[in-house]
Image: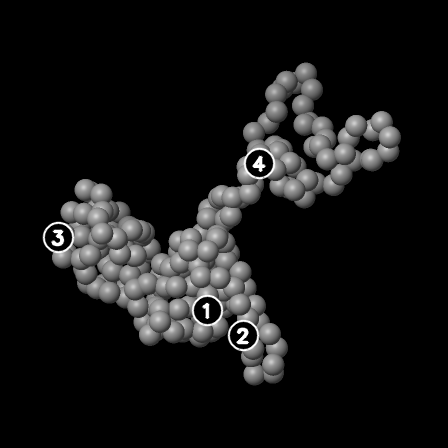
């Protein structure tokens, strides 16, 4: 069974296991999500479900039509997930219906934006000699091109924007599931800042 959910990052804390060992965890405010569209191989070329999350007062016109058709409160976020089960249109899915303690998940989010950074901070480059007159302390070294091809190749690690990118953390363990408060607690950290959107699904590594 493919498992999926949308949520918002609440923050990090710690819990203790049976032996008294402290475990760093992230609390995620999950769902409930509403199924608003089903995609099939016959019509769309692939199997998936489109779900909506987080109530808003008003949606844009293309999305508002889908919500009105199903008589569903407008939502802020719409995402697609691969699904191997048959879900009903308008079905509401809660976090405790999808996940249980011990499941392994992948979490996708947008990492914190940290502005423009040099190659040492951005790519963990080493520094240059700091002797008097070296004039080479925190810069990147040779760009690897001479007369041929007389240009910097694409993908060269240089200074630039750090963070604010779609990031996936794989194979995290579910430590706690609270269906009444719609909380999911996972071991370790997840991408993004507080209240940022997270896409949660079954891990592609272990399949649990």
Judged left or right of residue 68, residue 197 is right
Q: Nearer the viewer, mark 4 or mark 3?
A: 4
Mark 4 — residue?
116
Mark 1 — residue?
185
- Rounded to the nearest whole Å, what is the CA distance between mark 4 and mark 3? 45 Å
Disc 1 element: strand
Tell me, yes or no, if residue 66 can be seen here: yes
Residue that protrudes farthest toward the front in the picture:
57
Which residue is rendered at x = 42% and y = 55% of the image?
195
Q: Are marks 2 and 1 in contact (CB under 8 Å)?
A: yes
Up-down relation of residue 83 to residue 94 (above or below)? above
Mark 3 — residue?
69
User: x, y (%) of residue 41?
Assistant: 24, 51
Tell me, yes or no, if residue 205 can be seen here: no
* Near-viewer residue (167 or 81): 167
Earlier residue among tags 4 and 2: 2
Earlier residue among tags 3 and 2: 2
* Near-viewer residue (73 or 17): 73
User: x, y (%) of residue 119?
Assistant: 65, 37
- Rounded to the nearest whole Å, what is the CA distance between mark 1 and mark 4? 32 Å
Q: Are marks 1 and 4 in contact (CB under 8 Å)?
A: no
- Rounded to the nearest whole Å, what is the CA distance between mark 3 and mark 1? 34 Å
Which residue is rendered at x = 61% and y = 21% of the image?
151
Earlier residue among tags 2 and 1: 2
Residue 15 — which label?
2
- Which of the image's four quarters has the N terminus? bottom left
Residue that protrudes farthest toward the top in the picture:
147
Q: Are marks 3 and 2 in contact (CB under 8 Å)?
A: no
């Amino acid at each position: 069974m493919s498992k999926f959910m949308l949520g918002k990052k609440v923050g990090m804390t710690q819990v203790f296991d049976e032996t008294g060992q402290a475990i760093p965890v992230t609390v995620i405010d999950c769902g409930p999500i509403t199924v608003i569209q089903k995609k099939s191989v016959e019509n769309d070329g692939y199997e998936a479900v489109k779900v909506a999350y987080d109530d808003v007062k008003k949606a844009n016109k293309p999305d508002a039509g889908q919500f009105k058709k199903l008589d569903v409160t407008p939502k802020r976020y719409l995402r697609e997930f691969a699904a191997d089960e048959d879900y009903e249109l308008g079905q509401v899915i809660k976090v405790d219906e999808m996940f249980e303690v011990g499941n392994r998940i992948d979490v996708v989010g947008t990492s914190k934006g940290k502005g423009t950074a040099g190659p040492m901070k951005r790519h963990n480059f080493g520094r240059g000699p700091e002797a008097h007159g070296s004039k080479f302390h925190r810069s990147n070294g040779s760009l690897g091109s001479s007369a041929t091809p007389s240009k910097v190749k694409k993908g060269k690690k240089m200074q630039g924007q750090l963070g604010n990118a779609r990031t996936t953390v794989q194979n995290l363990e579910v430590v706690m599931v609270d269906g009444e408060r719609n909380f999911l607690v996972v071991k370790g950290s997840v991408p993004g800042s507080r209240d940022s959107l997270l896409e949660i699904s079954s891990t592609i590594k272990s399949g649990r």
